[in-house]
Amino acid sequence: MRGRARIITATAAAALLIGCASGPTAAKPKPDREGERVLVFSKTAGFRHDSIPTGIATVKELGAQNGFAVDATEDAAAFTAKNLARYDAVIWLSTTGDVLDAGQQTAFETYIRGGGAYVGIHAAADTEYDWPFYGRLAGAYFQSHPAIQPAKVHAEDHAHPATAHLGTGSWDRTDEWYNYRSNPRDRARVLATLDESSYSGGTMSGDHPIAWCQNLQGGRSFYTGGGHTKESFAEPAFRQHLLGGIRWAVGAVQADCRPEQGYTPVFDGTAASLENWKQAGPGSFALDEDDGTLTTTGGMGMLWYDRRELGSYSLKLDWKMSGDDNSGIFVGFPPSDDPWSAVDNGYEIQIDATDVPEKTTGSVYGFQSADLKKRDKALNPPGQWNTYEIRVEGERLRVYLNGVQINDYTNTDPARSLRQGHIGIQNHGDGDEVSFRDIRLKELPPARGTGPSGSPVSPVVPSESPAPTGSDAGR
């Protein structure tokens, strides 16, 4: 274990960063929901897994421990509009073959489009091959599998509750590892992948998703390929994985499940990835390489990415508060070892559980409040991870929280042009503890048009080659 090590110290500075003072209490993060109900459906018309009873018992145990009720059935007659309306999610547990008739399929489609949720476990991908809606909902259909064997799983998303507990190392476990007929990456957020070099029989050319989530036609879908064996349901890490997927599906916790491609990591949880970052002002950040996190220590200061200035881009990062804490992300400022550079010439996207609207989480600090109703609905409370996308195109700055757009601000100040500048994360001060994970960038096509003064502006040309092409994760 590499443990925690303090890094990135700096000399003290007297100046205080604007955007950090406490203020009157505003909207607080919503508490966890209680009283959800899920239906476990395990009808089989093909191969039947002997782990199904263990899986049902496990979901019931998780429900009893975490405040959601669980019903279980193998009767397809449960798929009526009236009955499905009772449930926040339907868990398809190793179902196989054609298990619903046309009327039951229509009822389930209507349920999903009305805001319902689907959770698929293992052989749920070996189900309903002639029902296109189901294939889209599951994300991919089963193709084949090798013998049960150990393999290494790697988490791609460290903010989703199904994978946030896995850290940066491999998750070593034994299961029956499915190959799929298609790759869901272009339409779902891949949460975890299989390392095909760690076992025999993988056929997906080295890009082998094994768990993913998506928002589809008004509903939510989570799928995990694990769960073939009875022993899977006794593994603490797998139980947490399954619980996180269920909690996201029923809406008890939020996450960004939009597809994500074309991003380049600029902090990946390692000390090596911090070589292009500098500390401005006092304080530091503590690096935990096992967990892949940077945690604020002291301040007020800022850690900024000095490799290059950015033009049009999408910045994504995951963050977590421990309580009523304070931090932020700065964008659009010139290079400087003085944190006032970011204050006077850039913008801060705030992280603060309690402050006035224009100075709380999701705000462009001091300039524009987030849409508080959307923000409150999308925000996870302290102790849980959140994901920001900060999207800069020309003078337009948009903020997405867990996949939901909560702010749309256009700069009109020539001194604060967003068309070129650096990015940074803030360490606010003693007593404030905010952690960051997986900071990644995607360069976007250069913005054209006029600057904040109304004069024509040429596109900003990146100093490096463009990021890899891929689907636009912000759309």
Image (spheres, rainbow, N blue to C red):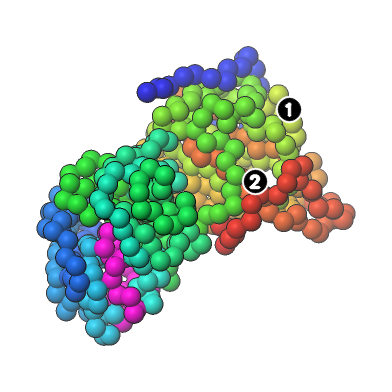
The residue at the point 44 percent across, 27 percent down is 288
Task: Pinpoint residue 333: horizontal percent, then vertical percent.
Answer: 72, 37
Q: Secondary structure at mark 1?
A: loop
Q: Which residue is mark 2?
A: 367
- Of tags 1 and 2, which is closer to the observer? 1
Q: Residue at x 24, y 46 (%)?
A: 239
Q: Which is nearer the N-term, disc 1 or disc 2? A: 1
Neighbor class of circle 1 (other Cα within 10 Å; few <14, some 14-19, many 20+) is some
In the rendered view, tell whether residue 172 sits above or below residue 202.
above
Q: Which mark is residue 456?
A: none
- Identify the secondary structure beneath mark 2: loop
Local packing at callout 2 (Cα closer than 10 Å; few below 14, some 14-19, many 20+) is: few
Q: Position of residue 265 (x, y in %)?
A: 57, 41
In this view, which residue lies farthest toward the bottom?
103
Q: Is residue 433 above or below residue 55?
A: above
User: On the picture, is 98 further left or further right than 347?
Assistant: left
In the image, taking residue 160 as reference, residue 408 lies left or right, namely right
The answer to whether any part of residue 86 appears in the image is no
In x, y percent, where is residue 150? 29, 43
Q: Quadrant of the N terminus?
A: top left
Residue 304 appears in the picture as rendered: yes
Q: Which residue bears the numbered disc 1?
A: 336
Amino acid at pointer 2: Phe
Image quadrant occupied by the C terminus: bottom right
Q: Is residue 216 above or below residue 99?
A: above
Q: Are marks 1 and 2 in contact (CB under 8 Å)?
A: no
| 288 in magenta | no
Give the magenta range: 106-131
Task: Kindly identify the residue that appears in the image at 79 percent across and 48 percent down.
Answer: 461
Of 330 and 127, the residue lying toward us: 127
Residue 307 rendering spot, x and y as whole percentages:
70, 33
